[in-house]
Image (spheres, rainbow, N blue to C red):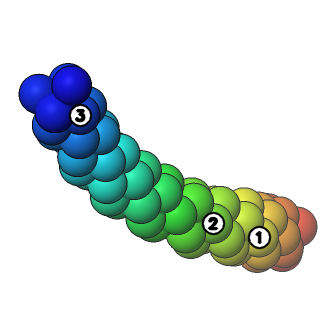
Amino acid sequence: MTTHIASLESHVEENSEYARVANQRADEARAIASGGDTMMQTVNHSMQDIVARSAEMRGIVALFDNVA
């Protein structure tokens, strides 16, 4: 009986360690995903700025075309 209890205790300790490692990896993955979200927001903002500046450039070119 004592052998079975010791074996069960060992399995519980191993499972606890696996759960701890899995939780740590999940935290790391969550941090990476959060960084990706931040990066995508930056890219989106930059693209919006490019579109806005492109519209300004089209306006300036149209003005030059009208003058010429």
- At 16% from the left edge and 33% from the top edge, which residue is drawn? 2
As drawn, 60 above or below 4: below
* Mark sitting earlier along the chain (2/1): 2
Please identify, in this view, whether the residue under mark 2 or under mark 3 is nearer the observer.
3
Q: Quadrant of residue 53?
A: bottom right
* Mark sitting earlier along the chain (3/1): 3
Across and down, in percent, residue 56 comes to 77, 74
Residue occupied by mark 1 = 52
- Do the residues under discs 3 and 1 have CB atoms within 8 angstroms? no
Dot 3: few (<14), some (14–19), or many (≥20) neighbours within 10 Å?
A: few
Secondary structure state at the residue bearing disc 1: helix
- How many marks the image carries: the answer is 3
Please identify, in this view, whether the residue under mark 2 or under mark 1 is nearer the observer.
2
Give the label on residue 41, or none.
2
Amino acid type of the residue that numbered disc 2 sits on in the rendered structure = Gln
- At 72% from the left edge and 65% from the top edge, which residue is drawn? 48
Amino acid type of the residue that numbered disc 3 sits on in the rendered structure = Ile
- At 41% from the left edge and 60% from the top edge, which residue is drawn? 27
As drawn, 7 above or below 50: above
Across and down, in percent, residue 66 comes to 88, 67
Residue occupied by mark 3 = 5
Could you tell me which quadrant the C terminus lies in?
bottom right
Secondary structure state at the residue bearing disc 3: helix
Depth check: 37 or 54 in front?
A: 37
Dot 2: few (<14), some (14–19), or many (≥20) neighbours within 10 Å?
A: few
Q: Residue furthest front?
A: 1
* Mark sitting earlier along the chain (2/3): 3
Amino acid type of the residue that numbered disc 1 sits on in the rendered structure = Ala
CA gap between label 2 and label 3 equals 53 Å
Depth check: 19 or 49 in front?
A: 19
